[in-house]
Amino acid sequence: MFLRVINKTKIFGTAFAAVAALGQADAAKSDAAGMAFFEKNIRPVLANNCYQCHSAEARNLKGELFLDSKQGMLNGGESGPVIVPGKPAESRLLQAIRRDGKLKMPPRNKLSGRVADNFAKWIRMGAPDPRVANGGNPVKSKIDLEAGRKFWSFIPPDTPDTPEVADNTWPRGEIDRFVLAKLEANNLSPVRDATRHELIRRTYFDLIGLPPSPGQVAAFLSDTSVNAFEKVVDELLRSPHFGEHWGRHWLDVARYSESNGMERNFTYPHAWRYRDYVIDSFNDDKSFRRFVREQVAGDLLGRDKREPTDEELVATGFLALGPKPLNQGNKVLFKLDVVDEQIDVTTRAFLGLTVSCARCHDHKFDPIPTRDYYAMAGIFRSTDALYGTVNGQGNRQASDLHAIAGNEADRVEKTRKHDNSLYRLNGRLLIMEEEMREYREKGSNATGNERTRMRTLTRDIRDARANIKSLEKKSPDADYAMGVRDGRIGDARVLVRGEIRNQGQTVKRGFPQVMDGVKAYPISNRSSGRLQLANWLTQPDNPLTSRVMANRIWHHLFGEGIVRTMDNFGATGERPTHPGLLDYLAVRFVEHDWSVKSMIREMVLSRTYQLSSDTTEANAAADPSNRFLWRMNHKRLGAEALRDAMLATSGRLDRQPAGGSVVTKLGNVNVGRAQRQLSQMQRNTSQRSVYLPILRNALPEMMRLFDTAEPSLIVGKRNETTVPTQALYLMNNPFVIGQAFNMAKRVMDTAEGRPDGIRLAYELAFARAATDDEVSRAHEFLNSVAEEKDRPGQWTVLCQALLASAEFRYID
């Protein structure tokens, strides 16, 4: 039957594709991401390896080629342009780096394959390059910290005055007043409010990442109390599924993965503990201030008073999860790269700043001198990362882990297993010793086979005694977690142009000077400085931390941030569309003890959130990208929510937490050598997608196709692509067909008669009733695809069409 359903689905491919309505779109990274990639991966290589011969400062310019400006690279030298944006194969610079032809650059030292791959990726991105100087005329500037402190994002937020509006009947709260004031100033009018069907589906997906059931929709529609919607919001904020959905948003930023990636893609068997820590933190509505402090310095929070808790140690996994060049033989270079990655994730996640762009030179756009980079580098160089990979198989950089107590049930179970192992070994040893005694009593009368057996027993008894001795010395297996701890304490020296052999002055550990108004605590010679950094990040007068998080929350509810460049609040980022509103939210966030749930509640209960996604011709002409929020943005379901919604709609979603990860069962292995096992593990689960094994360079197919966050990157805003492979997946993948089959069975088992079945299918898929026209069309459709005797096949094809429709994949 199942094969017949698949065949009928393929036969119906043409009509099905029309229902899916998928087209092609550009999947390129944003300009801001491209610029950040250039600053982190391209500019340092050019500066360290090319400028000596190919820049305006070169004593003897070679080949009339300038590589110190965008125009210089596009113009090229004596042999023409060296890059062709978008076309790595035609770019002579990449050929020279890879030494594919006669030209080999740099001439003496071959660059690594990773560097070449980064250049290829950069060229495919269109070779984004912020260097605007013409070749031979480089722009030189000196950072003016006083001027930098006047930039909007470095001025601490203050509670703004509530703006006056002409229509005082429309706003329901302060958020609405800020929005309406902007609309009125731009001659725009808000559209109608969302219907109750639209609102409950939107809110369920936005708060818990799952669709409402028909019963939940019916209960909301029948509730005529004035606070009916408020009750729904409060119920969803209490749901354990809230943390699973909002925790996944943070895991995007934290570049969460269960493997290292890069050339040596070893698994991280204990990374899942950080995932569960994040989920629990959002469910518990942990103060975001506490959340930040635990991730940066959880291992230090208990000093002088108590030992850090397991939770605090696990939280520091934030600093250990990043990709690392494990095949790097030079321990100093390895440490510098790990430190750079830690600076990058810390400053972008919490501050929305690209501080790591100042590793080789003063930041080209923001008031962050190189010395500020090395002031922070000293903090992280004084920190040891605990990521748990072992030596061997090309891994030259092994690491420890945090040993943690784990929970009581786990300890009891491990003690039982430990004791059972000892019992079995002792029992086996007694049997072998008794057998050996019998053979020895025979002496010279023992047969040849018996003497051979005695030699084997001698070896086995020796091994058993050694194993028993080892087990008796060991306590039951400890639980482990990734994280960090203080290492060898010391300040860092500036590396001129990022070169390890070109050391400059020593810089005291500290924080970006542009925010010198933020209260900072002195860093002693006995501590790395991470605790002081954690406290500095979460001071109420820090101008960025509360703004950045409030903006992240707004983005996930409204589809765009007030600052649309989520991880860049610097000069190359976008300016806020509603600066007063952003400051209001940042101040409110701090006043409410940095409560994420309180912030979400206020936003969701605003009238702005409850607008429909309708458009009007006049508004669309004046504000086509909806920057002033005259309607709700259409939002596409994330990859995880799409998969979870299919499972929920089919009735097969396992809503229980995973309680671990299948990756743990594999141990510390290279992902490439366990690909088949991992793929099977990723498929054979009906739990929520947040619990799927997330491995760098080996994401589950559905996650990869529907734009889940790239786990090697800090992702505050996901890409949203529409490509033909998505339509093919929805039409032909066994998972989608299987959920359609299960949904069809659910409909047939529940509904009485075809019209009721059609209505139930629409309620399950779209949280609304089918129109009379839709019922009629679905009835005709069922007649067209199969004979009445093949009811499962009929309903499966209809249900698959609903699951693949644009209405299922988008939130209005």
Image (cartoon, rainbow, N blue to C red):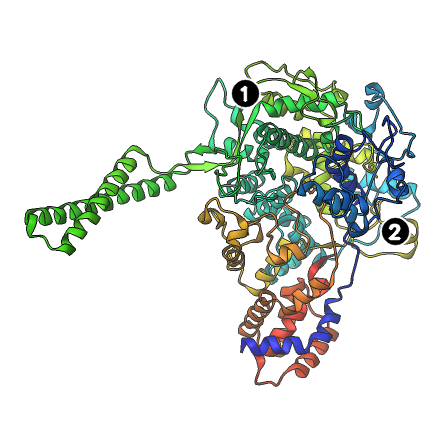
Say above or below: 726 vs 771. Answer: above
Label 1 amino acid? Arg
Percent of width and height locating residue 324: 60, 37
Say above or below: 746 vs 564. Answer: below
Distance in Å between CA atoms under marks 2 and 1: 55 Å
Frontmost residue, 40 versus 402: 40
Q: Residues within 10 Å of mark 2 (few under 14, many from 20)?
A: few
Frontmost residue, 572 versus 216: 572
Q: Which mark is residue 488?
A: 1
Q: Mark 2 against mark 1, which lies toward the viewer? A: 1
User: Which image quadrant for residue 715?
Assistant: top right
Q: Which mark is residue 442?
A: none
Percent of width and height locating residue 438: 9, 49
| Residue that appears at 67% across and 42% down | 114
The total number of labels drawn is 2
| Residue that appears at 6% across and 52% down | 445
Percent of width and height locating residue 125: 78, 47
Say above or below: 382 vs 388. Answer: above
Q: Residue furthest front?
A: 102
Q: SS for tag 1?
A: loop
Say above or below: 78 vs 133. Answer: below
Residue 212 visible at all:
no
Frontmost residue, 679 versus 796: 679
| Side of 592 where 368 appears, left or right | right
| Side of 139 where 93 appears, left or right | left
Q: Which mark is residue 624?
A: 2
The reply to whether callout 2 and callout 1 are in contact (CB within 8 Å) is no
Q: Residues within 10 Å of mark 1 (few under 14, many from 20)?
A: few
Label 2 amino acid? Pro
Q: SS for tag 2?
A: loop
Where, quadrant-wise, is the C terminus in this rendering? bottom right
User: Which image quadrant for residue 154?
Assistant: top right
